[in-house]
Amino acid sequence: MKILVIDDDPALTDLLKLILAPTNAIVFSANSGAEGLRLLREKTPSIVILDLMMPEMDGWQVTSEIRSFSSVPILVLSVIDNPGMVALALDAGADDYLIKPAPSGVLIAHINSLTRRKTAISPDTAPLHVNLRSVI
């Protein structure tokens, strides 16, 4: 599994690499929204872990940009503990939301849950939808 972490705090991206090391995931990190978008296009990760509060391009802008070209699962990891802001992030296209500091086991469980859901609804296994009126 490839994971892209986008957070303007290098200490946090390093810590997340350490936390995720036992999972054998390949972890890429970006310390800005623009760098994260570039890496997303280059590395095609299985999941993105994204901070909201970043300078220049915040997490909401990054989420919008990602959704314009990708359906990769986005897990927001933010210090913002405000239900309205959580709702905004999810409405912007994030798939899940955790508040920092999240216990490492909880973070890994959320990552696993998102990747299971993505695998379960991949184009090869997604439910088939047929407009019966067009067939008759």
Image (cartoon, helix red, strand yellow):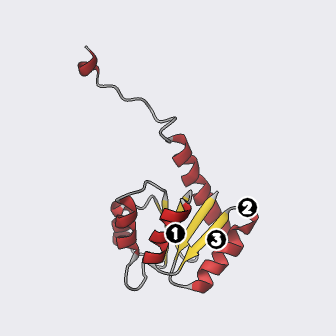
Label 3: few (<14), some or many (≥20) within 10 Å? few
Residue 6 is left or right of residue 89, and the answer is right
Residue 55 in the image, given as x and y percentages of width and height: 40, 86
Check the image and report above or below for 111 versus 129.
below
Q: Which mark is residue 103?
A: 3
* Nearer-N-terminus badge (3/2): 2
Can residue 135 be seen here? The reply is yes
Residue 29 in the image, given as x and y percentages of width and height: 58, 74
Q: Which mark is residue 24?
A: 2
* Nearer-N-terminus badge (2/1): 2
In the image, 40 versus 119, the foreground residue is 40
Q: Which residue is mark 1?
A: 39
* Nearer-N-terminus badge (3/1): 1
Place residue 136 in its image quadrant.
Answer: top left
Look at the numbered disc 1 and give the secondary structure of its residue: helix
Q: CA distance from mark 2 to mark 1?
A: 19 Å
Kind of residue at badge 3? Pro
Q: Report the mark closest to the observer, 3 or 2.
A: 2
Look at the numbered disc 3 and give the secondary structure of its residue: loop
Residue 72 in the image, given as x and y percentages of width and height: 48, 56
Kind of residue at badge 1? Leu
Label 1: few (<14), some or many (≥20) within 10 Å? some
Query: In percent of the image, x 67 and y 73: which residue is there?
Result: 17
Q: Report the mark closest to the observer, 2 or 1.
A: 1
Look at the numbered disc 2 and give the secondary structure of its residue: loop
Figure quadrant of the N terminus: bottom right
